[in-house]
Image (cartoon, rainbow, N blue to C red):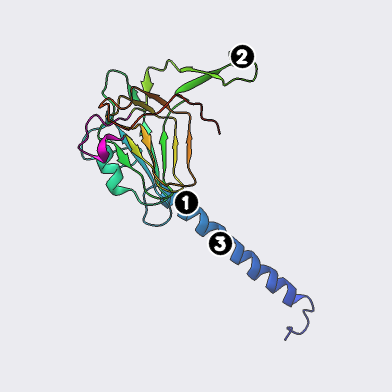
Amino acid sequence: MKPTGFPNAEPKIRQALLLSALTLSVTVAIGEVASADDNHPYGHNKWYVSATAAGGGNGSAAAPFNTLAQVQQASGPGDTIIVVPSPLSVPPLDGGIVLKTGQRLIGGGPPVVKFGAPLVSGGPPVVGSSGLSTLPRITNTTAASNSGDAVRLADDTDVENLVIPGPYRGAIYGQDAAGLTVTGNDISGFDTSGTAGFVVQPFYATN
């Protein structure tokens, strides 16, 4: 029932209620995103790992983990893991990592590879080193974990902008995994174990 003497009161009340609901919705959404970045239990989290970090970190940008095992254990499906670049004088993060469904494993900093013009018309681009003095590097130098693979993929995972030198077996390995994105990584010297049957012929991968 409309209040007497105010013929347009009902539409105005509805508009006010709708505006309040929209404001509340936007405020909650912004709050959840901010909390997720701070590793809040709601939403997808963002974790940091660095080869130069001190022990006792909590995986935040200010206090990264210093091992791949720590970030693998702490992270959950859908989370983003960022490998912080470190000087070339510092050994890569070792031990490998097994991703969970929907995770993103991203090397921080600028692109680690550069693409030049094709040698022949219509051919693949020439790929070279970026020449950076700090790089987001990981590896797995023994078979003690993940059979020596540096990265084990799961469904809907994304691996970008990493340098992976000299893993014991595969640099980035997935079996029956779907919905993958693997791009812009610098991989060299993989399968140092010479594992029988693990032979990868030269190929070009495009997105």
Residue carrying label 2: 120
Quarter of the picture containing the N terminus is bottom right
Q: Dot 1 lies on which element? A: helix
Name above or below for residue 21 compared with residue 62: below
Amino acid under disc 1: Val
Name above or below for residue 190 compared with residue 47: above
Name above or below for residue 84 compared with residue 177: above
Q: Residue at x 33, y 48 (%)?
A: 75
Magenta stretch in the rendered image: 138-149
Q: Residue at x 74, y 73 (%)?
A: 11
Q: Dot 2 lies on which element? A: loop
Q: Quadrant of residue 190?
A: top left
- Residue 58 seen in this snapshot: no
Q: Nearer the viewer, mark 1 or mark 2?
A: 2
Residue 88 horizontal/vertical position (percent): 31, 19
Whichever of labels 1 and 3 marks the residue nearer the N terminus, that label is: 3
Q: Quadrant of residue 191?
A: top left
